[in-house]
Image (tube, helix red, strand yellow):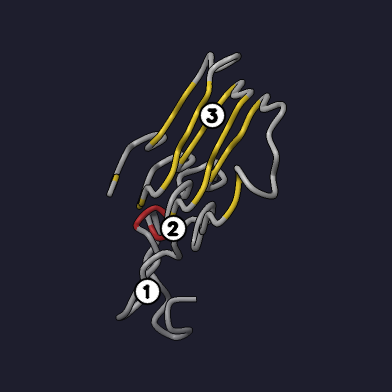
Amino acid sequence: MLKGSVNEAIKGTGLAGQTVDIENNTVGHAGAAGIQLAGADHLTLTSNDISDSGTRSPSNPAIYLNGVSGANTTTPISDNTAPRNGTAPPPPLQRGVVRPSPSRTRGHEPDPRTGGR
């Protein structure tokens, strides 16, 4: 398993004319796309599981294929799964009392008659 990459977990560039075979990989929590390939002319990309990747800003897809030609998307590119990719996780819930920031109250005291409003 490839886990926690800051950028792409699997990245290939300058692949024109090369046979590229990427199968049976598990990628989790890659900062950018889980798999990014550029210019792959003869590509087999099957049975890869990419999850929780591409969540940094701006978000990225689980698999990014740029300039791929001559690929058959029914057989050589198939059976890849990609749950929970390309979206940032929600911020943690804040519990407790919410108070205004000091910059909002600097320079005046809250009016006790109005509850500080």
Q: Nearer the viewer, mark 2 or mark 1?
A: 1
Tell me which residue sits at (51%, 33%) in the image.
36
Residue, x 51% and y 57% (percent of image)? 82
As rendered, which of 17 and 4 lies closer to the eye? 17
Q: Which mark is residue 104?
A: 2
Labels 1 & 3 near each other (Cβ < 8 A): no
Q: Which residue is mark 1?
A: 93
Give the image location of residue 105, x and y in percent.
Answer: 40, 60
Q: CA separation, marks 2 and 1? A: 23 Å
Numbered disc in front, either 2 or 3: 3
Q: Look at label 2 and name its amino acid.
A: Arg
Is 17 above or below relative to 78? above
**Label 1 Cα crowd, 10 Å radius (few <14 / some 14-19 / many 20+):** few
State the image coordinates of residue 24 (x, y, percent, origin top left).
39, 49
Please name the residue shown 44% across and 58% down the image.
104
Q: Quadrant of residue 89?
A: bottom left
- Marks 2 and 3, the one that precedes in the sequence: 3
| x then y, percent, for residue 55 | 47, 50
Q: Amino acid at mark 3?
A: Leu
Q: For the residue carrying disc 2, how many other residues have a C-alpha within 10 Å: few (<14), some (14-19), or many (20+)?
A: few
How many angstroms separate mark 2 from mark 3 (CA)?
49 Å
Labels 2 and 1: the sequence-earlier one: 1
Q: Earlier in the sequence, mark 1 or mark 3?
A: 3
Query: Badge 3: how crowded within 10 Å, few (<14), some, or many (20+)?
Result: many
| Near-viewer residue (17 or 3) | 17
Separation of disc 1 and disc 3 at Cα?
37 Å
Mark 1 or 3, closer to the camera: 3
Residue for point 45% across, 65% down: 90
State the SS at label 3. Answer: strand
Q: Secondary structure at mark 1?
A: loop
The tag on residue 37 is 3
Using the image, determine if residue 62 lies above or below residue 70. Answer: below
